[in-house]
Image: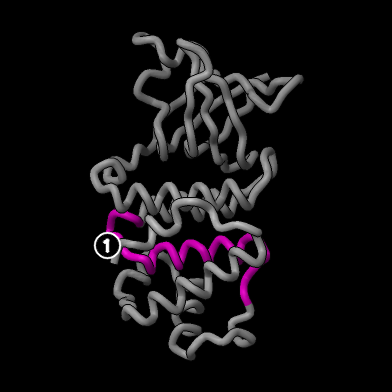
Amino acid sequence: MDERTTGLILRTRPLTETSLIVHWLTRDFGRLATVAKGARRPKSPFQGKLDLFYVADLSFVRSRRSELHTLREVVLRETHPALRTDLSLLQQAAYSVALIEQTTECDTPLKEIFQLLENFLRHLPLPPPLARTVFAFEIKLLAELGLKPDFTASKLTPGARRLLEKFLSDDWPALLPVKLSAAQNQELSRFLRGFLQEHLGTVPRGRDAALELS
């Protein structure tokens, strides 16, 4: 029986000369992987619909033998074209995906995290690429995972604490006017890296590239 949901493409890779494996973050089922049979053929119904950060309504059939399910239908909703015009935006988007993949399990409902990533990608092209956008994503994701840092117990300066509290509580449009000094960028980068290192064991690759933007 077909299952239906809305998903955001995290990664793709070839399976055979004609088929593609597509990794999704979905609204209803969390992270899952599908095989798009024949997707690499020129006349495939999937042609032009399966690329990084695309958002689509999809249907799939679950496999009884593995975690690789069969993709049946894809209806595009959003392609985020701006992410393909700026390497810095692409680096930020790629890091956000790596962080989600490291901190979540497959086939676990992640509705709030799906919404967080969707809003983050929609917001990315609005300001110039800045480190503060990555900091806001990290702290919002940590809160959704139940890993929100205790700001009062940290050695952060009062200004840095207020910034993190704002990043956590405000929606993306409200963060547009926020500006950080070079010292604040360095302080927040060190604090969040240390926190991620402590709780995840390793920091996902791509963080440095995502932060060298402002």
The image position of residue 26, as x and y in percent, is: 56, 40
Q: Secondary structure at mark 1?
A: loop
Q: Quadrant of residue 56?
A: top left
Q: Which residues are magenta?
A: 124-149
Of all residues, the one furthest to the right in this rendering is: 64
Image point (53%, 53%), residue name: 204
* Magenta stretch holds residue 121: no
Quarter of the image with the N terminus is: top right
For residue 53, side relative to residue 26 (left or right) = left
The amino acid marked with disc number 1 is Pro
Q: Quadrant of residue 163?
A: bottom left
Q: Which residue is mark 1?
A: 127
Quarter of the image with the C terminus is: bottom left
The image position of residue 177, as x and y in percent, is: 29, 74
The image position of residue 31, as x and y in percent, is: 61, 39
Of all residues, the one furthest to the bottom in this rendering is: 158
The image position of residue 134, as x and y in percent, is: 42, 62
Quick check: 97 above or below 162? above
Which of 134 and 183 lies nearest the eye of the viewer? 183
Q: Residues within 10 Å of mark 1 (few under 14, many from 20)?
A: few
